[in-house]
């Protein structure tokens, strides 16, 4: 079989804590196969690009792990406080792109 490669993304993941009473920390896993790559395709780690924009409150990406078979990370968004002088709930948009190969 001939060498194959492809580009995925940017995949956009949005998380918004509006109307949620507790903080949210979501585990995200991306594999090449879920975006159309053939079985056995592997991620080229130096090609992984991730950026995010926080549009409200406290939100961030953490625990990013890049391996040949998957990209794993967590997305945190803070819930709004119930108090009179509380804070805004968190909202974030995360974009991830990568290249894969199969030889």
Image (cartoon, rainbow, N blue to C red):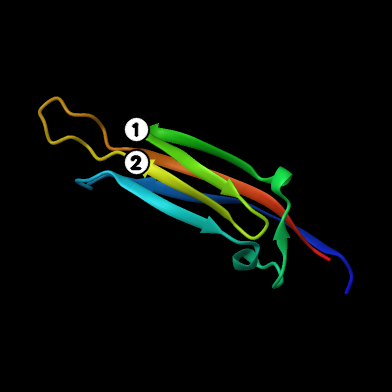
Q: Position of residue 39 (x, y in %)?
A: 69, 73
On screen, residue 72 versus residue 14, left or right, reads right
Question: Which quadrant holds the N terminus?
Answer: bottom right
Q: Position of residue 61 (x, y in %)?
A: 46, 40
Estimate how packed mark 2 is, as few (under 14), some (14 to 19) or many (20 or more) residues with alpha carbons within 10 Å: many
Dot 1 lies on which element? Answer: loop
Question: Could you say which is closer to the camera, residue 65 or residue 49?
Answer: 65
On screen, residue 1 versus residue 69, left or right, reads right
Q: Residue furthest top?
A: 85
The disc placed on residue 81 is none
Q: Position of residue 43 (x, y in %)?
A: 70, 56
Mark found first going from the N terminus, 1 or 2: 1
Q: What residue is shown at x 40% (from left), y 34% (from top)? A: 55
Q: What residue is shown at x 84% (from left), y 66% (from top)? A: 103
Q: Are marks 1 and 2 in contact (CB under 8 Å)?
A: yes
Choose top left, top right, bottom left or bottom right for residue 68: bottom right
Estimate how packed mark 1 is, as few (under 14), some (14 to 19) or many (20 or more) residues with alpha carbons within 10 Å: some
Residue hosting label 2? 77
Q: CA distance from mark 1 to mark 2?
A: 6 Å
The disc placed on residue 58 is 1
Q: Residue furthest right?
A: 2
Count of labels in the image: 2
Question: Could you say which is closer to the camera, residue 75 or residue 36?
Answer: 75
The correct choice, above or below, for 44 with respect to 87 in the image is below
On screen, residue 85 versus residue 8, left or right, reads left
The correct choice, above or below, for 9 with respect to 34 in the image is above
Choose top left, top right, bottom left or bottom right for residue 8: bottom right
Choose top left, top right, bottom left or bottom right for residue 50: top right
Q: What residue is shown at x 38% (from left), y 36% (from top)? A: 59
Q: Position of residue 40 (x, y in %)?
A: 71, 70
């Amino acid at each position: 079989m001939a060498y194959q490669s492809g580009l995925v993304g940017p995949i956009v993941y949005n998380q918004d804590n509006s109307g949620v009473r507790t903080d949210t920390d979501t585990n995200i896993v991306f594999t090449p196969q879920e975006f159309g790559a053939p079985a056995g395709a592997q991620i080229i780690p130096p090609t992984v690009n991730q950026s995010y924009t926080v549009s409200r409150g406290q939100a961030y990406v953490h625990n990013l792990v890049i391996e040949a078979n998957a990209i794993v990370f967590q997305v945190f968004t803070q819930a709004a406080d119930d108090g009179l002088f509380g804070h805004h709930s968190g909202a974030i948009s995360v974009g991830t792109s990568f290249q894969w190969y199969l030889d």
